[in-house]
Image: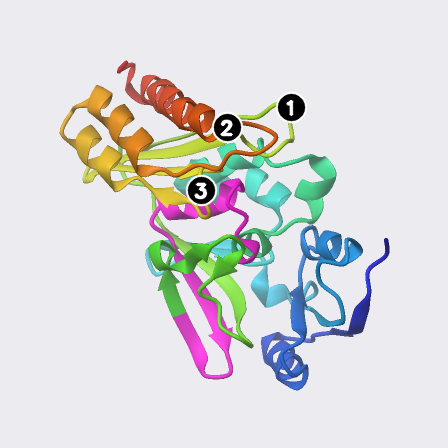
Amino acid sequence: MKALAGGYARARDVTHALDLLAQADGMGRVLAGGQSLIAAMNMRLSTGDMLVDISRIADLRGVAVEDGCLRIGALTRHADIGTDPLVATHAPLLVQAVHHIAHAAIRNRGTIGGSLAHADPAAEFPACVLALGGTIHLQGPEGVRQVAAEDFFVDVFETAIEEGEILTAITLPLLEAGERHVLIETARRSGDYALAGLCVVKRAAGHRVTAFSVGPRPVLAMAAMERLDAGDTAGAVDALRAEIDPPSDTQASAAYRRHLAGVLLTRALHDLTGETA
């Protein structure tokens, strides 16, 4: 099948993009890298949309340290995140994620903002930003606002983005001394979506653990984090398995995904500290 669009317009800047969305009468769709949107349109899962192309807005691209945070523009491509020295210094979890994302063609076109806005529960970047305690920056008709990652991901392909808003940037805390990051996942083949995956961040204040491909959105594993902070690694594995609700599908059963999540946590902890559960 071929995509069926209701129109196309290229935005000059964010203000112009917001005007175009407002004129689309609820049918506007933001086009950035297009790796998810165009695929959905080709399968006629989304038809008659007015495409608002923001891909040439330079202000939405790039990485910088600003106001004590790492700021990543929404249009920064996966491949650029994988090679950016500031990301490698302050958010190495994202660099690890890039190596697991699909294939080179996807990484060269896909954007981090598009990945977060699409909110695929099996995607790596949403789980990474949640594990890092990031903030999502949005701009819309009512102005700008910030949403904590914990409040951003709502359900399968559903986020806190409101009608007419555009995701403009992500900010993350700068890396602390001694902070460690691990992303680990299992997939049937390189480039496939993970059967289950985990992000583990170890900071002075404690652990942050997120799981992906085990539910309708990335999961911040609060019970597992509490057990890890208490030094109970075996308890953390049990807690993680208890607090996720993975689906069964043609790739794996819910029971297998739950078991796999615990195995991955054990491996991640070994990579971080040499501990075993």
Q: Residue at x 69, y 34 (%)?
A: 103
Q: Which residues are magenta?
A: 117-145
> Which is more foreground, mark 1 or mark 2?
2
Tag 1, which secondary structure? Answer: loop
Q: Residue at x 57, y 26 (%)?
A: 187
Residue 215: mark:
3
Label 3 – label 2 distance at C-alpha:
12 Å
Q: Quarter-wise, where is residue 205 in the image? A: top left
Residue 253: mark:
2
Label 1 – label 2 distance at C-alpha:
17 Å
Q: Position of residue 24 (x, y in %)?
A: 68, 81
Residue 219: mark:
none
Label 1 – label 3 distance at C-alpha:
21 Å
Q: How many labels sit on residues?
A: 3
| 86 up-or-down from 11: above or below | above
Q: Residue at x 55, y 31 (%)?
A: 194
Tag 3, which secondary structure? Answer: loop
